[in-house]
Amino acid sequence: MKKSCFVAFAGAVLTLMTSFAQADVGLNVKAGTLGAGVELSKSFGEKFSVGLGFNAYDLKTTDSSSDIDYDFNFDLQTVALLGHYHPFSGIFRLTAGALYNKNELKLTGKPSAGSTYSINGVSYTAAQVGTLTGTLTFNSTAPYFGLGWGNRPGGKLGLSADIGVLYQGSPNLALSATGALSDPGLASNLEQERRSAEEDLSDFEWYPVISLGLYYRF
């Protein structure tokens, strides 16, 4: 499924790049909740344009809970194919499209000697659990809807702003522990903990998108 989505996006990219070879092409450099990004846009008349963009951001941090250090790696990567409609032929626009979504969160537990994990309400020593890892992923194709200002067809240079929402589906959480390979009880509790955590994270199926940028039209 992910491969077919990538092929579809790649085909759209090639088609759009052929169109970009013509006149009235814009470049928008921006930063926001999807990370740092760049977007190429092609205008079709005074009210409509299409854009092809890439956004990325990588954050690594460590947090502690109950004497256990957790390494977090929040990796944002999206490729966006968007249509912009300027109803009044000005800077205000309506935007809709889809993103190839590779946003994910990875964590690794690093317990200190003598510390314990609480998994599904059951306490386990660090030795029993071993290395605990988790990965949170979302749908590979995510529709986007939003409002924007700037990047007007015919405009030469200016600021841009976007506010919208990305529907990335219910989060998928994978949890594993090396100790679960030899302990069926731990494996069962780990699965229950995973299901509970997925329910708690269900609100993240909608991701807010806010960005500011600078555009230039060639």
Image (cartoon, rainbow, N blue to C red):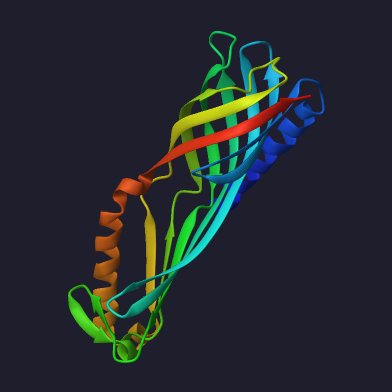
Whole-percent x, y for residue 9 in the image: 63, 41
Image: 183 above or below 199? below
Location of residue 112 by image quarter: bottom left
Location of residue 161 by image quarter: top right
Whole-percent x, y for residue 189 in the image: 24, 75
- Residue closest to the far left: 121
Image: 123 above or below 154? below
Total of numbered circles in the picture? 0
Query: Which quadrant holds the C terminus?
Result: top right
Residue name at image x 28 percent, y 61 percent: 197
Residue 73 is left or right of residue 151, and the answer is left
Image: 130 above or below 217? below
Residue 119 is left or right of residue 20, and the answer is left
Residue 83 is left or right of residue 176, and the answer is right
Q: Nearer the viewer, residue 2 or 28?
A: 28
Whole-percent x, y for residue 177 in the image: 37, 80
Whole-percent x, y for residue 186 in the image: 27, 81
Residue 174 is left or right of residue 11, and the answer is left
Residue name at image x 59 percent, y 50 percent: 56
Residue name at image x 65 percent, y 24 percent: 158
Location of residue 133 by image quarter: bottom left
